Amino acid sequence: MTTSQGPVRRVVLAYSGGLDTSIIVPWLREHYGAEVICFCADLGQGDELSGLRARALASGAADCVIEDLREAFARDFLFPMLQAGAVYEHDYLLGTAIARPLIAARQVALAQAVGADALAHGCTGKGNDQVRFELTFQALAPRLKVIAPWREWDIRSREDALAYAERAGLEIVWKRTSLYSRDRNLWHLSHEGGPLENPDTEPEPDMFQWTVDPRQAPDEAEELSLDFAGGRPVALDGVALSPAALIAALNVRAARHGVGRVDLVENRLVGIKSRGVYETPGGTVLVAAHRALESLCLDRETAHYKAQVALRFAELIYYGQWFHPLREALQAFVSSTQTRVAGRVRLRLCKGAVTVIGRVSAESLYREDLATFGEDDVYDQKDAGGFIRLFGLPMKVQAMLRGASEEAQALTAPDHGWFKRD
């Protein structure tokens, strides 16, 4: 088939092995007559990758490339996001959003290596992921054609997709009664669709696949410590670990205490609201620890301004603009703030909660001799009076002017004695 940009002979498809991307393989061959090469990024999906290549080939793909990107994901995407303090709409730790630019970037690299003339993805026309993939494609390979089947075909539901899979002769490994859409990686596990589409419906207990129900978590709390250098976690309980290994180990410990569950109605980029339930065990602990350490190491003005930057940074990730010049510029600012963020944070995990119980840093700006309410030699409390008078001077001047104005109005009022007439 020829598109407006020319013929399509070879396509590299972002492939997860799920229902949607599995039916896309025969659909691309049927409608475009193109050779399909599947690409899968190993970002920590675990058992989901088992038999993936065989399924891709069985569906008609010419090849399936699986690339282990767990360390790159943690080092080059998750940790910079953590340093920025980026959280979307208060609660979403951006587990899906932050993964898409890496997947798309490596998909582009493969397409260039095999001489493909098109890229394809399995994102729906209602979601955020289509934007995230395609903005990355535009930033890195603007001349490659993009095929988004969900915006072209007449399949509109999971049931339609299952029916197409049966017609195409694909092995059905999905149950019609399980209609959740899930995304899993090293950072989180998300759940959407099905019963969750009613925001007043409580998630079914068996929907959760990673974290223990906090009510059934161990009664005995667990304590741990995290070491940071340059705003990045480098050790768990004093043991140095690679970025991916540290997150994986922390996931295990936090998940068994039910840490990291979030039920959120969020504002999608495309203009509609959606509900998602997220499990982010290790990430939740890391965010709490990083915030605690920054409270020691960052001065007030930098900390407050960085909080504003964090909101914009989170939006840029959520909107798929990882490769936007603004994100790169903000990253430079964030990196400069993290040079002094180093030290150790102690935390307690218990019944779904993560609590900071201690923090220490050689770069700490906290001074006990200044913070104490007792006597000290470095802070003269009498100085506070002059500071308050100067700090509040604009408010005082405004009040004085307002008072003078009110007095003038009272003196010139028609019923004032000075203006009485016979």
Image (cartoon, helix red, strand yellow):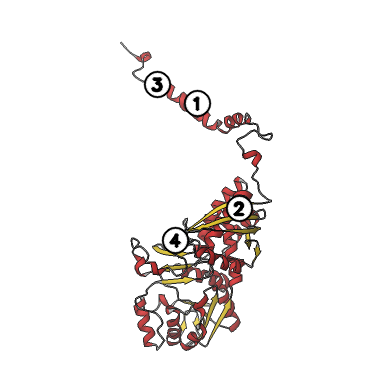
- Amino acid at pointer 3: Ala
SS state under label 2: helix
* Spatial CA span between label 2 and label 4: 26 Å
Q: Are marks 2 and 1 in contact (CB under 8 Å)?
A: no
Q: Which residue is mark 4?
A: 214
* Spatial CA span between label 2 and label 3: 56 Å
Specify the label residue 400 is tagged with. Answer: 1
Dot 4: within a 10 Å radius of its alpha carbon, few (fewer than 14), some, or many (20 or more) residues? some
Image: 106 above or below 315 = below
x, y percentage for residue 70?
Answer: 58, 72
Question: Which mark sits nearer the N-terminus, 1 or 3?
Answer: 1
| Foreground tag (3 vs 4) | 4
Question: Which mark sits nearer the N-terminus, 4 or 1?
Answer: 4
Q: Are marks 2 and 3 in contact (CB under 8 Å)?
A: no
Question: Which mark sits nearer the N-terminus, 2 or 3?
Answer: 2
x, y percentage for residue 16?
Answer: 49, 77
SS state under label 1: helix
* Spatial CA span between label 1 and label 3: 15 Å
Q: Is residue 10 visible?
A: no
| Foreground tag (2 vs 4) | 4
- Residue at 49 percent across and 65 percent down: it is 256
